[in-house]
């Protein structure tokens, strides 16, 4: 928990969110400003500022984060048509919230390359 972190406050329930999934180590909720018909953020409950700062102790957690995201993607009906995962890191990566998060984006055709 980081006192000045928006997503830690969401995990703690101090800031409301539209929850999709929660377990001991992972929380998922709808993005407040959706960039696609389905836009869900999947985050570790442990405060990791960015994916680049994850360490060997986070190896299992990162795997489980993706597996939980897969379950959510299936539950949201995204598996057949496809979807996109995004993890932004740092300034050039477009990261705006300094708590590691995996975006699940689906429900429309994605384009490449990203802007
Ligand atoms: P980033 O740009 O860091 O990869 O993604 C941060 C995401 O968090 C953005 O898509 C933004 O819309 C979302 N976001 C920012 N503040 C809030 C909030 O208070 N609640 C929710 N649910 N999403 C937020
Ligand atoms: Zn945090």
Image: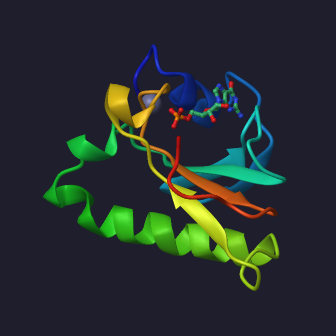
Return the x and y of residue 79 as percentages of the image width and height.
71, 81
Return the x and y of residue 30 as percentages of the image width and height.
75, 45
> Which quadrant of the rendered structure holds the N terminus?
top left
Name the outermost residue toward the bottom. 80
Foreground residue, 7 or 111?
111
**Residue 49 in view, yes or no:** no
Which corner quadrant of the image does residue 112 belong to?
A: bottom right
Which corner quadrant of the image does residue 75 belong to?
A: bottom right
Foreground residue, 24 or 92?
92
The answer to whether 53 is drawn above or below residue 7 in the figure is: below
The answer to whether 39 is drawn above or below residue 106 in the figure is: above
Return the x and y of residue 106 as percentages of the image width and height.
74, 62
| Residue at 56 percent of width and 70 percent of height | 68
Which of the colour schemes (rainbow, by chain, secondary structure, one colour) is used?
rainbow
| Residue at 49 percent of width and 45 percent of height | 101
| Residue at 51 percent of width and 75 percent of height | 67
Q: Ligand 2 lies in which image quarter?
A: top left
């Amino acid at each position: 928990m980081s006192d000045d972190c928006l997503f830690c406050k969401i995990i703690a329930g101090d800031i409301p969110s539209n929850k999709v999934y929660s377990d001991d180590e992972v929380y998922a909720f709808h993005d407040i400003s959706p960039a696609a018909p389905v836009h869900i953020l999947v985050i570790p409950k442990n405060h990791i500022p960015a994916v680049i700062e994850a360490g060997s102790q986070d190896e299992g957690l990162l795997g489980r984060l993706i597996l939980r995201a897969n379950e959510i993607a299936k539950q949201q009906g995204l598996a057949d048509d496809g979807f996109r995962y995004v993890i932004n890191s740092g300034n050039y990566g477009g990261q705006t919230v300094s708590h590691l998060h995996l975006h699940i984006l689906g429900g429309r055709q994605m384009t490449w390359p990203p802007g």
